Image (spheres, grey):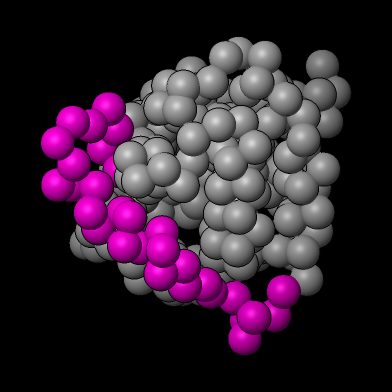
């Protein structure tokens, strides 16, 4: 098997919903958006997901993932943990922060059991999912740009799965959203790569308010 084929298979493994990190348990605020009627059908679900993808995931997670992977590749561990801390500090609510460190810790345990951490020690504040994703990607010789595509795809698939349960949507409608937003994943990856540090970061007050009110919903399917 060629190195490129092996890297692709490992990327598919990282992006798979079967990866045991608990992503299926989180909606990242969508459950609250459905409860107040912001998301109620296929078009509104697509617009919601696209908005979070372009305005939050790209300038925060994907841009940080690019720097995390680069720092890991060059052996700059100080920069790696600095970007990890920046990413965790970017979470605007307790639920979103908890989600990030829980998924990051789950992927860290997988990598530890596979002996892929080179004796790295997790900092007291935890590791973000993107930082753990970068460790896996660099350790498995996945190109950083492809790693961003895999991360974006995994996020998109989880958001569509949440919408399928919450709206609810049929499977065909869910696939239509994925088909519509495929080009956006590539465009967002390219944008994240060229962002400078002053352009990184985002604040979505509506998402923050919805996330903060999620813990008081009368019934909940998701943890965020």
Residue nearest the observer in this picture, 62 or 73: 62
**Which residue appears at 41% of the width and 59% of the height?**
207
* Visible residue check, residue 51: yes
Q: Quadrant of residue 76?
A: bottom right
Task: Tell me if residue 129 comes above or below residue 173 in the rendering.
Answer: below
Q: Is residue 165 left or right of residue 172?
A: left
Q: Nearer the viewer, residue 118 or 43?
A: 43
Look at the picture and state if 84 lies above or below 142: below
Give x and y (percent) for residue 214. 24, 47
Question: Residue 221, located in which quarter of the rendered image?
Answer: top left
Position of 23 compared to 192: left or right? left
Give the quarter of the figure containing the C terminus: top left
Please provide the residue range marked out in magenta.
195-224
Relative to 208, say whether 159 is above or below. above
Magenta span includes 104: no
Residue 129 in the image, given as x and y percentages of width and height? 43, 48
The reply to whether residue 98 is in sight is: no
Side of 215 where 69 appears, left or right: right
In front here: 208 or 142?
A: 208
| Quadrant where the N terminus is found in the figure | top right
Residue at image point 46% right, 67% down: 204
Q: At 41% from the left edge and 32% from the top edge, which residue is drawn?
A: 23
């Amino acid at each position: 098997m060629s190195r490129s084929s092996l890297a692709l298979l490992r990327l598919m493994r990282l992006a798979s919903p079967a990866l045991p990190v608990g992503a299926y348990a989180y909606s990242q605020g969508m459950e609250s958006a459905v409860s107040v009627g912001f998301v109620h059908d296929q078009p509104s679900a697509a617009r919601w997901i696209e908005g979070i993808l372009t305005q939050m995931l790209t300038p925060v997670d994907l841009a940080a993932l690019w720097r995390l992977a680069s720092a890991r590749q060059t052996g700059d561990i100080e920069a790696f943990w600095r970007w990890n801390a920046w990413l965790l500090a970017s979470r605007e609510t307790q639920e979103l922060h908890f989600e990030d460190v829980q998924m990051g810790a789950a992927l860290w345990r997988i990598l530890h059991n596979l002996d892929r951490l080179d004796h790295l020690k997790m900092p007291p504040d935890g590791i973000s999912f993107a930082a753990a994703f970068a460790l896996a990607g660099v350790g498995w010789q996945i190109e950083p740009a492809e790693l961003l595509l895999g991360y974006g795809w995994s996020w998109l698939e989880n958001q569509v799965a949440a919408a399928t349960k919450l709206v609810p949507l049929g499977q065909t409608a869910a696939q239509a959203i994925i088909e519509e937003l495929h080009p956006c994943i590539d465009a967002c990856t390219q944008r994240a790569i060229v962002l400078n540090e002053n352009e990184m970061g985002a604040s979505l007050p509506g998402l923050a308010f919805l996330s903060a009110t999620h813990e008081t919903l009368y019934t909940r399917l998701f943890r965020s």
